[in-house]
Amino acid sequence: MAKIKEIKARSIITKSGLPGADFVVNPYIGCAHACLYCYARFMKRFTGHDEPWGDFVDVKINAPDLIPKNFDKYRNKNIVIGSVTDPYQRAEEKHKITRQVLQKLINWPCSFDIITKSALVVRDIDIFKKFPNLNVALSLAFTDDIIREGLEPGADSIDRRISALKALHENRIRTTVFISPIFPILSDWKKIIRLTKKYANGYWFENLNIYPSVRDNIYAFFKKNHPELIGRYREIYKDSRAYWRGMEQEIKNFCQKEKAAYRIFFHHNDIKK
């Protein structure tokens, strides 16, 4: 169980370094999903937490009050909600910070992308309907819940996420399936597309980057659950550029065949250790 603490933030809308996003909103610090591969672990360098990633969540209790009344600076910009935290993790059930922030943003002349692994997102369908340009991106990287539980121990099951996607679609909310991160061999992204195609307006793809901060976690998972993959992964990441270039082309060909809209956000960093 993650340690929950209420804090007061200095700001809530910050400039983004993400491709395609101008600004980000993160209603929480930390994430109880505790995904072993999460790049957002770097946040601990700035937050002063001693707890392992996944064991703490700071609630930005004053976040709704930090939404400015003058939105000229943000006109026609894209705002992503949930870049280094999940805005619909369990703490949101009680604190409703994401919901309150969204209520303040309804009339803003912006486009919004919400990124989540949580089925709780369906709670706010009533608010989503008030936005002319909002997209909910449900993150889904696996079709096997045993693998999912090992790598995303605090996140919702695959069935719950697909059910949420269906509910959003049936309520005419624009949806994206964010297939991220793609684990070589383990992520059956073609099956994910086949399972969700009826409910998704499009797909985003992001590859697995084995950052130094997550390397030990990932290889410990392999050692325990899939030791046969360790050698294969070490081989792939000797020259990850070549592997992911091939995967990129395969995704393009498959999506074009399936008539599925797609965007690919691949990073081609070589991690050689």
Image (cartoon, helix red, strand yellow):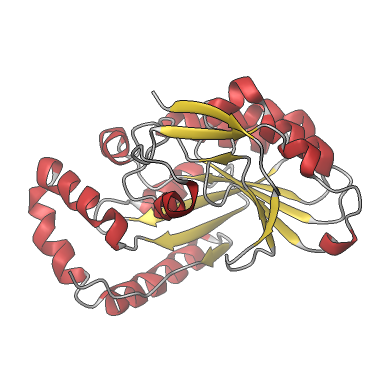
Is residue 151 left or right of 253 when viewed as pictured?
A: left
Q: What residue is at 33 percent from the left and 33 percent from the top?
A: 153
Is residue 33 left or right of 216 when viewed as pictured?
A: right
Picture coordinates of residue 155 (x, y %)? 42, 33
Answer with the quarter of the image where residue 93 lies.
top right
Instruction: Using the rendered image of the protein, determine whether residue 113 is visible from the camera's viewpoint.
Output: yes
Q: Nearer the viewer, residue 100 or 153?
A: 100
Q: Nearer the viewer, residue 193 or 152?
A: 152
Is residue 268 left or right of 129 when viewed as pictured?
A: left
Q: What residue is at 26 percent from the left and 37 percent from the top?
A: 150
Q: Nearer the viewer, residue 165 or 267?
A: 267
Q: What residue is at 71 percent from the left and 39 percent from the top?
A: 63
Picture coordinates of residue 158 (x, y %)? 41, 34
Picture coordinates of residue 263 (x, y %)? 55, 65
Answer with the quarter of the image where residue 61 lies.
top right
Picture coordinates of residue 11 (x, y %)? 71, 49
Q: Is residue 87 above or below residue 245?
A: above
Answer with the quarter of the image where residue 239 lies.
bottom left
**Quadrant where the image shows the N terminus:** top left
Instruction: Using the rendered image of the protein, determine whether residue 130 is visible from the camera's viewpoint.
Output: no
Q: What residue is at 47 percent from the left and 60 percent from the top?
A: 205
